[in-house]
Every structure is written in C-alpha cells, then in structure tokens.
Amino acid sequence: MTEEMLPLRGRRVALPESRELDLFADMLIKRGADVLRCPLVSIHDAPDQRPVLDWIREFIEQPCEDLILLTGEGLRRLLAAAERSSPELKERFIGQLARVRKITRGPKPGAALRQIGLKADVTAVEPTSEGVIATLRSENLQGRRVAVQLYGTDPNRPLMDFLRQAGAMCSPVSPYVYADDTEDVRVEELITALVAREVDAIAFTSATQVRRLFQIARRQIGEPALLNAFACIKVASVGPIVTEELQGRGVRVDLMPESSFFMKPLVRELVKSFGSTAASPSSP
C-alpha cells in the first residue's frame, strides 16, 4: 500500500477503549498504526438483575411520559436483560420505548436507539447531565413520570434533584456497573510505555478511563510524572465530556472531533494530525 493509504504508518497509538476496543483498533491498524491495547475499565451487568427487570416491567405496565437515556451502554444492557428474561419482554419493552419521549444526553444513546429502529425525540444541548438539565429547564415537568437510565452506580444527584424539584416523579435504573478491578498490571504497563515515550498518541473515549489511569499512576509514578508523559505525546479525546475530564486534571488535549463524537471521526482527527508522513514511535 502507498503512504497515502497508510497515513499512520510508524505511529503507535495507545487505546484504553473497552467495549469496542477491537473495532477501534482495527480502524487504526488499517491505516498503518501500531496499537497498544489496554482496556482500563471493564463494564458488567448489575450484579443483582431483579431491580433492573422490575424497572423494565414497571416501565411497560405503568407508562411514563419521558425517558432520559444517559448512555448507549445503558440501553443495550436493558435490552439484553429483557431478552434474557424472555424475547416477549424485550419486544414489549421496545414497543413502550417507541411510545415515550426519549431524551438523550449525547450521540451514543441515539446510536443505540437507531439499532432497534428508533430515534431520540430530544437531544441535550450539550452531551452532559448539565446539558440535559438545561434542555429541560424551561419545561413544565410537574406531575410527569420520568424514567432515568443512570450510568454505573453514580446516582447523578444533580439531575435527579433537578427533576424532583421540578415536580417530576422519577424512576431511575442502573443497568450496569464499572469494574474498577481491571488488572492493575496491564494499566501499569501502559503507564510505563507512556513515560518511556513508546507511544505517539493515546486516545480516550470515556472520562472513566481517564480517572482510572490517574488512579493507578498516582501510586505507581505520581501524578506529575504522568502529566509530563502526556506533554510529550498527542492526547486525543472523543468528545467534550472526556476533554473536560482531561483538562480538569491539567492535561493538554490535542485532538477532538468537532461535532460528531464517535470513534471514526476521532480516527480521522488522528490521521489529520499526523498526516501521511511515516514516523518512528516517540516522535509526534
């Protein structure tokens, strides 16, 4: 292949992505990159599925007016839980999803809806919980039943407090948990590679990845050493939430898609930044 077809040849990119790691890695490899894979965060179904299934049945049998989807992962986990219980329950759940007003925090829940033939009715003005609040602030929520899909075990008090103070009747569900006990050894190996300048870039796709990396680095090498390592490579972020997390920790963000916050646009930004000139690792 020509240099134009392999614009990332000679570049090494660290990927902390979990669920879609293989897809992300393949996109980079096809463009010539060498990929260092290190899933920082593992996601699992909620250990106790009974409250999740109870929520799904209540969602079907006692319809609400609104459903707030904070993550695509959450919707997929809800659909999987319903299907494991029975195909009929999943079908009824999707049918009720079609009838309620669906409010999404960002593009990923919208993409998960499209996978089942549905679409968001309202998208937050910004892909954050604060963006959801700003989007709904001017509405009369008094007496409305609002279902909320939370992420991880975070109760999201700002959003829930806003809804309750606005008079809404809230029904939250937490369909998955983050497993922070991902093998520390692999994370430590990634940190060692960053400090040794063995990668040209690192691409983050969630704020949880950032928090996990800093947690391990703090006890392995210290936060200042990690920040120094980041200063020597290109730091890529999939979107504003991740960028805010990085910048809040003093990390310079070099690359972020302008509007479409997905992996493919992120890969395009990496290609655009490195251009078609081949290089050896540690020379961004």
Image (cartoon, rainbow, N blue to C red):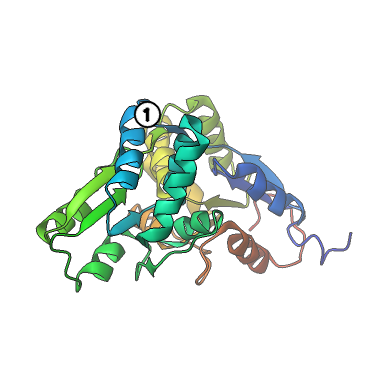
Toward which corner of the image does residue 51 lie, by quadrant?
top left
At label 1, counting other C-alpha atoms closer than 10 Å, the crowd grade (few under 14, some 14-19, many 20 or more) is some
- The residue depicted at 58 percent of the width and 57 percent of the height is 263
Q: Residue reaching furthest bottom?
A: 138
Question: Is residue 90 rendered to the left or right of residue 46?
Answer: right
Residue at mark 1: 49
- The residue depicted at 29 percent of the width and 52 percent of the height is 63
Q: Is residue 201 at least partly visible in the picture?
A: yes
- The residue depicted at 50 percent of the width and 47 percent of the height is 229
Count of labels shown? 1
150 or 4, which is in the foreground?
Answer: 150
211 or 131, which is in the foreground?
Answer: 131
162 or 272, which is in the foreground?
Answer: 162
How far across and down, in percent of the image, does residue 212 sit?
Answer: 41, 38
Toward which corner of the image does residue 272 lie, by quadrant?
bottom right
Under circle 1, the secondary element is loop
Question: Is residue 210 rendered to the left or right of residue 235?
Answer: left
Question: Is residue 32 rendered to the left or right of residue 174?
Answer: right
How far across and down, in percent of the image, does residue 257 sit?
Answer: 53, 67
- The residue depicted at 15 percent of the width and 53 percent of the height is 161
Q: Is residue 277 above or below residue 170?
A: below
Q: Amino acid at mark 1?
A: Gln
102 or 235, which is in the foreground?
Answer: 102
How far across and down, in percent of the image, does residue 160 sit?
Answer: 19, 52
Where is the N terminus found, in terms of image quarters? bottom right
Q: Is residue 150 at least partly visible in the picture?
A: no
How far across and down, in percent of the image, does residue 36 sit?
Answer: 64, 41
Where is the C terminus found, in terms of image quarters? bottom right
Q: Residue reaching furthest right?
A: 1
